[in-house]
C-alpha cells in the first residue's frame, strides 16, 4: 500500500458547494388574485414595479428588509387597479445558497407573495 502525499490547500475549503438562485420574480398583492395573475397569458412580460437587492445581507437582515418591503408592495398593489397584484423582483446574488433558501422559504410562507411564472416578469 502506497501512502499518498497530499498537500492541504486552505483556499479550496468551502469550494464546490451549490450556488443559490440569483433572483426571484414574484407577484405581490391581494391573496385571492395571486394565482389568477400567475397564468402565463395574463401576466406575460411585465416589468417589475418593485425590487429589493439583498446582496451582502445576513439571513436576519434579509428577512427584516423583506418584511418592510412587503408592506410597501402590498400597499402599492392595493392602491393600483384590479387584480391588485404587482410584479416584483428579489435579488439575492449568486453566492452560496443560504440566502436563496431563506428567500425561497419566505416566499412560500408569506401569504401575499407567490412565485411568478417563468418569463412573466422582465428581469432587465
Image (cartoon, rainbow, N blue to C red):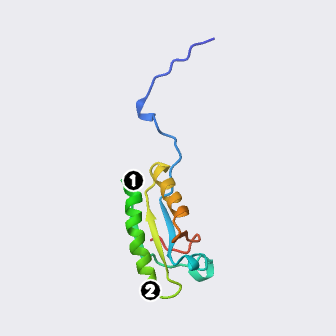
Residue 72: % across, % down: 38, 74
- Of residues 6 and 98, the one nearer the viewer is 98
Secondary-structure class at tag 2: loop
Secondary-structure class at tag 1: helix
Residue 20: % across, % down: 50, 53
Q: Residue furthest top?
A: 1
Say few, some or many: other residues with alpha carbon within 10 Å of mark 2 (under 14 / 14 to 19 / 20 or more).
few
Q: Which residue is mark 1?
A: 60
Q: Measuring 44% from the left and 86% from the top, which residue is drawn there?
A: 80
Horizontal side, residue 2 vs residue 112: left or right: right
Question: Does any portion of residue 55 appear in the rendered image?
Answer: no
Q: Is residue 34 above or below residue 22?
A: below
Question: Does any portion of residue 61 appear in the rendered image?
Answer: yes
Which mark, residue 39?
none
Q: Measuring 46% from the left and 38% from the top, which residue is drawn there?
A: 14
Pick whichever of labels 2 and 1 is earlier in the sequence: 1
Amino acid at each position: 500500500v502506497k501512502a499518498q502525499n497530499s498537500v492541504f490547500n486552505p483556499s479550496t475549503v468551502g469550494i464546490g458547494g451549490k450556488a443559490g438562485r440569483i433572483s426571484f420574480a414574484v407577484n405581490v398583492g391581494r391573496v385571492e388574485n395571486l394565482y389568477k395573475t400567475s397564468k402565463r397569458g395574463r401576466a406575460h412580460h411585465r416589468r417589475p414595479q418593485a425590487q429589493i437587492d439583498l446582496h451582502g445581507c445576513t439571513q436576519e437582515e434579509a428577512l427584516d428588509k423583506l418584511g418592510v418591503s412587503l408592506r410597501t408592495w402590498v400597499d402599492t398593489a392595493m392602491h393600483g387597479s384590479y387584480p391588485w397584484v404587482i410584479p416584483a423582483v428579489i435579488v439575492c446574488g449568486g453566492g452560496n445558497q443560504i440566502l436563496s433558501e431563506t428567500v425561497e422559504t419566505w416566499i412560500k410562507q408569506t401569504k401575499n407573495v407567490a412565485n411568478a411564472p417563468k418569463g412573466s416578469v422582465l428581469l432587465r
